[in-house]
Image: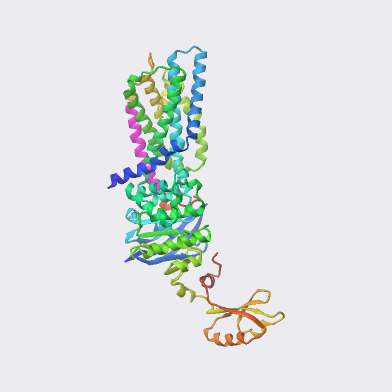
Amino acid sequence: MLAVETHNISRTFVKKKKVKVALENINLKIDHGSFYGLLGPNGAGKTTLIKILSTLLLPTSGKAEVLGFNIADETNEIRWRMSLVSGGEFSGYGLLTVEEQLWMFALFNGMKSKNAKNKIDELLEIVGLEESRKTELAELSTGMRQKMNLVRGLMTDPEILFLDEPTLGLDVEIARDVRDYLKRWIKTGESKRTVLLTTHYMQEAEELCEKIGIINDGNLIIEGSSDEIKKGSTYSSKYIVDTASQYDIKSEYESFELNNISNNKYEILILNKEDENELYNSIRFNKKITKFEIVTPTLEDAFMSLTGRELN
Amino acid sequence: MILSHAFRTIIARAYPRIIASFRHPSWFLFEVSLPLLSIVTFVYVLRLFDSPSQFESYAVIGGCMLPVWFNVVFAMALQLRWEKDSGNIEIFMTSPAQITWILLGMMVGGGFQTILMSGTVLFIATYMFEIKFLWSNWHQALIVFIPCVMSLYSIGMAMSSVFLKAGRAFEYYLGLTEEPVQFFTGSYFPIFSQNIVLAIFGSLIPLTLGIDGLRQVLVEGEYFTLLNWRYEALIMVIYWFIALKFAKFSLEWMEKLAREKGTLTLRWQ
């Protein structure tokens, strides 16, 4: 069964009489029990798509189903089974403590007070927030607040979790904690939990997601596993080389695409896999090349090849 | 199932308001001292002109009820706008709880705060000026007070979606209504004995009827009014139902608009 299925979803906004196309004919299929990542730069349409799927927005055209329910008219069925957590979220009431805040939102989601309190105890311990349970929201740091938001999203043990840039603005350590917990959460779900993550951090998408979709200017350009997407890069691998000074590398390697990175540092792109051996031998025995390393394409490279722009 | 969910949602949303009354009591000082200051001013003016003593009682009742109105307008109607700006609306909307239940929770919590505040003002003012109310009529006073507060909060609920659409400019216009509301409701003087046309016009605000009804049942002595407090209570119940109906309609309209145009979920809207 599919957790998410969209058919030609499009969304336009009208602002000051100007029409902005946020999404254009998006067709998406996300398997139940999978971790799916939507990768794209700011303004690509990721948040709009997640808002449509989480029943906050209607598409201008097309249709979508979440957990088999139509997003247009079966919203409550979906809302009972989903959670949405956004990065940089400052929701809640500053005078409430962390546990009061979580209790309040849990009750909105239909949980009984006692069950909510038990779940709060369990989750706060897991994410390392138990010492802050009595802290008022206004006193929390951004990282702690985001951890609390994540706990809020997990309180009802949703069948589908929508995460919109969940690690936005977090320091490296906390972002890693959040990612680690999400990995554990989906693993322990016995294929009953699905996550749709939007991010513009490639590393995050690569680390967490089994399948990634790249979205740009409202269009889903490509989707597949991280390795499959990397194949979309214009080169199969590249050499980063340091050369001796006054060495004219350009004339020696004129048949290859060569870019100057910094003083005496170049990258040589291998566009055809057949050239790999020839280039390797040439570089290895070239005494004017003082240092070299082979780099395989990253998601960022694939993204640049596909869209002609940088991700961040 | 639905009823218990609604009940839990109302309790959960009322909680921040109730807890706020005790956790940060500084607001209380502010909310009590300002209305009290107005009452003190009016009572001294009345004494200066040797007005009948029941006029002081009228001023105290009006002074205690006026903050109820402002609490409804500012804390209830503008609250939803604040919820939008802080991102809470998104969480409300993605939960299976109905937005009406959440607003009812605000109403219960806000009502608690208001009663606490008005009660304190009433207690202090009564003690300060040695005012004698007919406390034996407390049940009649409740028959007037409850529909008055409920109709005001229902108006607040109805206004909340309108304000959400209208934007921040409304906050400014609301500020401008302060003096006219004081005047038309006859907060510090018995408006029905002054000008009938003004009084009828003022009765469009349930607060006018509430103040008038409370004066009838709690203040000793002769009192000129157009309507008996029982009819006033009945009219306020009607206001309450009309406002609730309108609130439900406007909230559904707001939700529909929010999903179609993104008016609640996009910060630039």
Name the image quarter holding the N terminus of chain A: bottom left
Q: Based on the displayed image, in which of its 4 quarters is residue B75 positioned?
A: top left
Tell me how the rendering is colored.
rainbow
Q: In this view, does A128 lie above or below B185?
A: below
Give the magenta-colored segment's residue range.
B233-257
Would you say the magenta stretch is mainly helix, strand or loop? Answer: helix
- Residue drawn at 50 percent across, 28 percent down: B33
Q: Is residue A290 above or below residue A143?
A: below
Q: Is residue A262 above or below residue B6?
A: below
- Asked if residue B263 shows in the view, the reply is no
Percent position of residue B53, x then y: 44, 14
Percent position of residue B129, x then y: 46, 18
Percent position of residue A81, x then y: 34, 56
In the picture, measured across the screen, residue A67 lies left or right of residue B90, that is left
User: Is B245 a magenta residue?
Assistant: yes
- Asked if residue A170 shows in the view, the reply is yes
- Residue drawn at 69 percent across, 82 percent down: A248
- Residue drawn at 51 percent across, 71 percent down: A299
User: Is A74 a magenta residue?
Assistant: no
Residue lying at the far front of the rendered structure:
A131
